Image: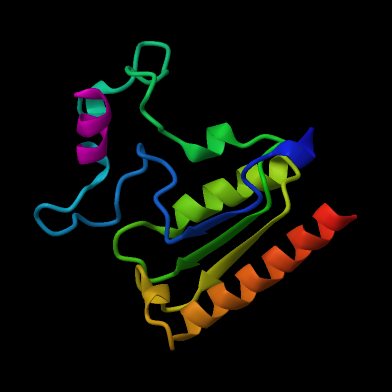
Amino acid sequence: QAAKRLVRAVVALDACTDLSLSMTKPVRFGAWDEAMAARLLCGSDISEAAAADGSPACPQMPGAVAALISAYTPPTFLLHGTMDAFYSLEHMRVLARALAEASVPHVAVELPLMPHASHIAPAGIPAQLVAYALTHILIALSSQQSA
């Protein structure tokens, strides 16, 4: 069954992993924040998006990615800068804990002093780390498939 999965690996770079965790600081006007995402997804604000039992007010609202982790989640590579001004490290840490609890193979890298989206510069250290990690993830997945 596991060999039939279509998603073979997940890469999350400076990701917002939970719409209910607020951003570290507001972004520039016009950028999508978690409240904007909630309005676009279900026509309500984050503060209105939970029912009395704590479930999302609209079923299509993604909410916490960590709640979707299971033993069938593919190997995951997480990278987050410690100086991310938009999303705190807690986003990555929550997801890493959920992956560990489900025994999902994963790597979580905290890049000291790196800001949000620092991996975009191709010659930068974060981009090189991503390229290295992805190469090894792909090699590992290829060897699993051929075994």
- Residue 125 percent across, percent down from the top left: 49, 85
- Is 71 positioned to the left or the right of 32 in the image? right
Rendered image quadrant of residue 118: bottom left
Residue at position x 74%, y 68% in the image: 139
Q: Which residue lies furthest to the left in this view?
A: 29
Q: In which quadrant of the rendered view does residue 129 lie?
A: bottom right
The question of residue 33 being in magenta is answered with no
Q: Give the range drawn in magenta.
A: 36-43
Q: Which residue sits at x=30%, y=65%?
A: 85
Q: In this view, does 44 lie above or below 52?
A: below
| Residue in view at x 56 percent, y 33 percent | 68
Say whether residue 37 is magenta: yes
Query: What percent of the width, then of the height, locates residue 20?
Result: 35, 37
- Name the residue located 90 percent from the left edge and 55 percent from the top edge: 147
Q: As rendered, which of 32 and 111 lies closer to the eye?
A: 32
Q: How many marks on residues?
A: 0
Image quarter (top left, top right, bottom left or bottom right) of the N terminus:
top right
Residue 140 spot, x, y in % from top left:
77, 63
Could you tell whether 72 is left or right of 110 in the image?
right
Is 57 rendered above or below residue 72? above
Q: In this view, does 146 lie to the left or right of 118?
A: right
